[in-house]
Image (spheres, rainbow, N blue to C red):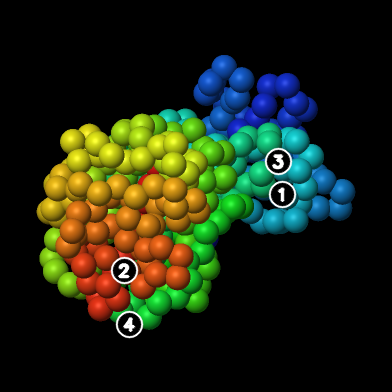
Amino acid sequence: MKSRQAFSLIELSITVLIIGVVTIVALNGKSLVIKANCVASTLGSKSITDNLDNPTKLTKNKSTAYENCISSGGLIYSTSCKILLAANPGTASGIYTIDPDGAGSLASFDAYCDMETDGGGWTLVLNYLHKLGTNPALNPRTTDLPIIGSTTLGGDESSNFNYWGHTKPTLLNKFTFNELRFYGKTSGHGRIIHFKTSFAGCINYFKTGDSSSICTGLNSSFSPFPDHSASIPSSANEYYNNQNDLAMTAFPFCRTGAYWSVKGWSGGNRWEVDDNCNNGCDTYHQVWIR
């Protein structure tokens, strides 16, 4: 697993646990971002050093002491990759610690941030690298996100839950976002699914999983990236809903012969990227939010 990088925010209303020389800038009217080297206060018999440059890249020397610092209310993380990038322009893609609900009950966790595509700021919320002929269970998540391992077709990441999984609607609702991005490729052909959308029907459906929203209309409400060559979503004419925790995976958009499917329905065997390959192709699916 790649090393973890984190960005720390200080709430104005709390006691700051940072000493030393720091430079801070306003982020959203309430929070401040550490922009220079600093040293955290000694916590009991342990101390930590935050090596914060520009962007504020954090190296944890004493993980226990650092977690104590966070839990004491002294430090919190950025709520998304987009917020992190806005506060620290030029941040590289990689694994960062985020906390979508800020001071809420959800603990911070690692996320993979794409800081390059279309200006960056994308948070990965679905990642499945599937090997043909296998039909493993999916991994819906409520407390953390998958990160990227391999992107090479033919791999099988189903046994590594660091990489294998997607967010349930309950977790997705902790995030503030207005864009979705889909990426998919398969060994069955050379077409790539890669587009973004701000279509409210899809966003709301992924947040609820129920019948109150649906992706109908996505076929005319998306922006393809240069490598997009698939027939869907532009030719999509079917949009499943009411799939609950499988909203992202079970045919949110498709047409006969061309599907977005990550296993499909509960108990299904449909691993498809713009085709009807069933389980006869290696596949790779991603969903991002921003």
Give me the residue at 61% from left, 30% from top. Answer: 22
Q: Amino acid at mark 2?
A: Trp
6 displayed left or right of 126: right
Considering only order in the chain, which callout, 2 or 3, is on the residue closer to the N terminus?
A: 3
**Mark 3 to mark 1 CA distance (whole Å):** 18 Å
Secondary element at tag 3: loop
Q: Where's the C terminus, which quadrant?
A: top left
Instruction: Identify the mark nearer the N-term, 2 or 4.
Output: 4
Amino acid type indicated by mark 3: Ser
Mark 1 lies on residue? 66
User: Which numbered mark, 3 or 1, is in the foreground of this view?
Assistant: 3
Residue at the (77%, 27%) spot, across then down: 15
Q: Quick one: which residue is furthest to the top in this view? A: 29
Residue holding disc 3: 105
Q: Position of residue 127 (x, y in %)?
A: 40, 60
Q: Residue at x 63, y 47 (%)?
A: 108
Residue 163 percent across, percent down from the top left: 46, 65
